[in-house]
Amino acid sequence: MKTFATDSISAPDAGRGRGRLNTVLLIMLTASVTGAISGCGASTNTAVRQSMSTGSAPVSTSASAMPTPTAAPISTVALIITTAPPPSTSAAAAPSTTSLMPSVVCMNLQDAQNAIHAAGVFFSRSRDATGAGRKQILDRNWIVVAQSPGPGTPISEGDAILSVVKNGEPNSCG
């Protein structure tokens, strides 16, 4: 006799009811197999299902009580093969740059970025004008002292470069 240790059974008389457990497992296995077969379109024997679920003896059913599957007549299928049109030889027009760089010198960095966003460009870069390489964490604490390109120049994403110093540091904005 094999015994199995599980975390969920810890009582000393856990061996009782093992026959019932085997019966339940057999019913569950039969039900899952029956469900899988019936899901595939095959017919199942209702007498077997009845005896497994109720424990009663199988009841004979006649073959005429079972529905007989019928196949639909095969119809003609037309297969149409088409080819894609040849690719056009004209080059796609490049998107026009309609954004113009606004004048942002002497604005705080946040307001300068907002002005560039309003012009239609959402990615700009900023640099520490002192050359110390400091990162601009709070944009309102920095002031723009130079810009590239100059005001009125057409720009696209990433073209705007703003040179900044911290508020209170010497600058030409006064």
Image (spheres, grey):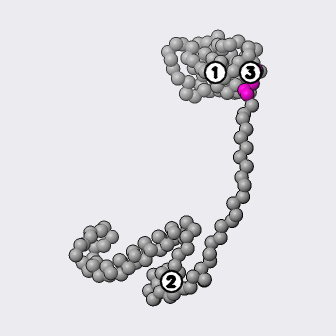
User: Which of disc 2 and disc 1 is earlier in sequence?
Assistant: 2
Nearest the viewer among 82 and 59 is 82
Query: Which amino acid, mark 2?
Result: Ala
Res. 139 visible in picture:
yes
For this orientation, the residue located farthest to the top is 172
* Res 149 → quadrant: top right
Nearest the viewer among 58 and 9 is 58
Badge count: 3
Residue bounds of the magenta highlight:
86-91
Tell whether position 88 is magenta.
yes
User: Which residue is depicted at the point 51% across and 20% down?
Assistant: 134
Marks 3, 1: nearer the viewer: 3
Q: Position of residue 93 (x, y in %)?
A: 76, 21
**Which residue, given by chain and number where applicable, does mark 3 sit on?**
89
Marks 1, 2: nearer the viewer: 2
**Which residue, given by chain and number where applicable, does mark 2 sit on?**
47
Q: Position of residue 58 (x, y in %)?
A: 47, 86
Q: Secondary structure at mark 2?
A: helix
Q: Secondary structure at mark 3?
A: loop
User: Which of disc 1 and disc 3 is earlier in sequence?
Assistant: 3
Res. 167 visible in picture:
no
